[in-house]
Amino acid sequence: MQTTVEQSNAPLQEMDIHTLLKNVVVHGASDLHLVSRSEPQIRIDGKLVPLNLPVLDGKKIEEMCYALITDKQKKHLEEEKEVDFAIALPNVGRFRGNYYYTLGGELAAAFRIIPTKIPSLDDLNSPPVFKEIVKREKGLILVTGPTGSGKSTTLSALLNEINITERKHIITVEDPVEFIHENKKSLFSHRNVGEDTKSFATALKFAMREDPDIILIGEMRDKETIEAALTAAETGHLVFGTLHTNSAVQTLNRIIDTFEGSEQQQVTNMLSISLTAVISQMLLPKIGGGRVVAQEIMINNHAIGNLIREKKLHQVYSQMQLNQQHTGMITQTQSLEALVKKNLVKKEDALRISTQPEELKTRIGL
């Protein structure tokens, strides 16, 4: 039988988008989905749960959702068939929204809650090495993982550590801007792609004239953006970025494979020097409720830099396992093993997301 969440904040005839979004907050959910021919659904601990409300159609979704966007955003939606944005609703919360069309040209919407409180690395129980890598003067730090794996939260905590300890100028380029940092010791310039700049690549090109110490790139989507990020990291800036990859080795391959022919060797050389760390993460259901993160951490050192330069990427995983007490590195398998042995996640959930399932089976005794 399908579980539903009772809606209690307003009578059905008064239902509107603000009330629906308030349900996300009330029920501790992460997302709200509005799709034609379905009741509204929210995601709790990674699972979709329908609200106990009538089935929606495209007209009703459009009526509710158009109230949140500007005329410019409506025009973009109608021309491009999708639009991303962020919005803060008084007494409700801040959300990232995406509108798109489904079969038959009916509007659909997905909303994700953005916490208004910036988490600290301690709040996230992050490993000590995170506080070390943010002290670097230059380099490229990548946080990777699938959609909904907490990449933005980890990045916000890394920037927060800099904000409370260093006097730096931090430029963030996102689509849309998610976490908004209050200036503490550092100075933030938040830029929204499509509103404040035309593209990630354009923003990076002109960032060099804006005297940044640190640059955050919301997503490294294409060759031009990746190349600009590597150049910025090589020329004295600390650059943070994200990719939708599941491991350090996959991340390295993705970046190199973005380029062709003779360009690959140049990018490989840049990556071997400029890369600081790759943090690959997944969120798993936590026993007893909630979710917990599994993180693989690769820190670039002389040995790994040589493997990257020589394109021996298949050896990087083994190198990550050496001298971990000194390097701060950890493989995904080790992270998952620790979560299972602490009775925080089920074995089957750990195996489901593992990139090395046979190794994990051996380590957890299956």
Image (cartoon, rainbow, N blue to C red):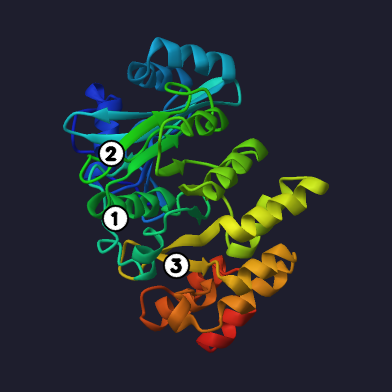
Q: Amino acid at mark 1?
A: Glu
Q: Which residue does the numbered mark 1 point to in the structure image?
A: 161
Instruction: Compare marks 2 and 3 and give the one earlier in the sequence.
Output: 2
Rendered location of residue 94, percent (x, y): 28, 35
Q: Amino acid at mark 2?
A: Leu
Q: CA distance from mark 2 to mark 3?
A: 31 Å
Q: Is residue 243 above or below residue 354?
A: above
Circle 2 SS class: strand
Residue 331 lies, with reference to residue 99, above or below; the image says below
Precedes in sequence: disc 3 or disc 1: 1
Count of marks placed on residues:
3
Tell me if 66 is positioned left or right of 121 in this view: right
With respect to residue 184, does 195 lie above or below? above
Mark 2 or 3: the one toward you: 2
Q: Which residue is mark 3?
A: 294
Q: Is residue 222 above or below residue 71?
A: below
Locate residue 343: give its quadrant.
Answer: bottom left
> Which residue is at 67% across, 69% downward?
306
Point 58% across, 44% down: residue: 231
Mark 3 lies on a secondary structure that is: strand
Q: Secondary structure at mark 1?
A: helix
Q: CA distance from mark 3 to mark 1?
A: 21 Å
Which circle marks residue 187 in the picture? 2
- Give x and y (percent) for residue 271: 63, 56
Choose top left, top right, bottom left or bottom right for residue 116.
top left
